[in-house]
Image (cartoon, rainbow, N blue to C red):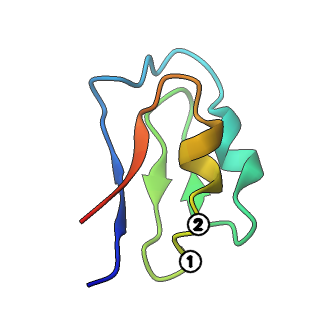
């Protein structure tokens, strides 16, 4: 089973522009205003770059 990218919204401060959105190599993350990022699972290649880059560990690769 492939891992799936998940957002732990309780860890996301949602008061800033998400730095992980810009690091995604395939554009699978988007953000409106200062809300938690949204994942396009059809685009996501599960590389883990965003989860490594997220300062609050709100983006995680899970089962």
Whether residue 31 is visible here, answered yes or no, is no
**Pointer 2 or 1: first along the chain:** 2
Asked which quadrant contains residue 58, the reply is: top left
56 sits left or right of 24 in the view: left
Residue 54, placed above or below residue 6: above
- Residue 26 at x, y percent in the picture: 70, 72
Which dot marks residue 45? 1
Residue at the (46%, 83%) spot, across then down? 42
> How many dots with numbers?
2
Residue at the (23%, 66%) spot, across then down? 63
Whether residue 40 is visible here, answered yes or no, is yes
In the rendered structure, are the residues bearing label 2 and label 1 in contact, judged by CB atoms less than 8 Å apart? yes
24 sits left or right of 62 in the view: right
Residue 29, placed above or below residue 52: below
Residue 27, placed above or below residue 6: below
Marks 2 and 1 sit apart, C-alpha to C-alpha, by 8 Å
Where disc 1 sits, the SS reads loop
- Residue 50 at x, y percent in the picture: 60, 49
Which dot marks residue 35? none
Name the front one of labels 2 and 1: 1
- Residue 8 at x, y percent in the picture: 30, 37
Mark 1: few, some, or many residues within 10 Å (few <14, many ≥20)? Answer: some
Residue at the (34%, 68%) spot, across then down? 4
Mark 2: few, some, or many residues within 10 Å (few <14, many ≥20)? Answer: many
Where disc 2 sits, the SS reads loop
The residue closer to the viewer here, 49 or 27, is: 49
| Residue under numbered circle 2 | 28
Asked which quadrant contains residue 17, the reply is: top right
Split into 4 quadrants, where in the image is the N terminus?
A: bottom left
37 sits left or right of 49 in the view: left
- Residue 22 at x, y percent in the picture: 76, 47
């Amino acid at each position: 089973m492939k891992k799936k990218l998940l957002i732990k919204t309780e860890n996301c401060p949602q008061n800033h522009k998400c730095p992980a959105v810009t690091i995604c190599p395939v554009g699978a993350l988007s953000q409106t205003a200062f809300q938690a990022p949204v994942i396009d699972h059809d685009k996501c290649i599960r590389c883990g770059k965003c989860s490594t880059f997220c300062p609050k560990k709100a983006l995680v690769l899970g089962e």
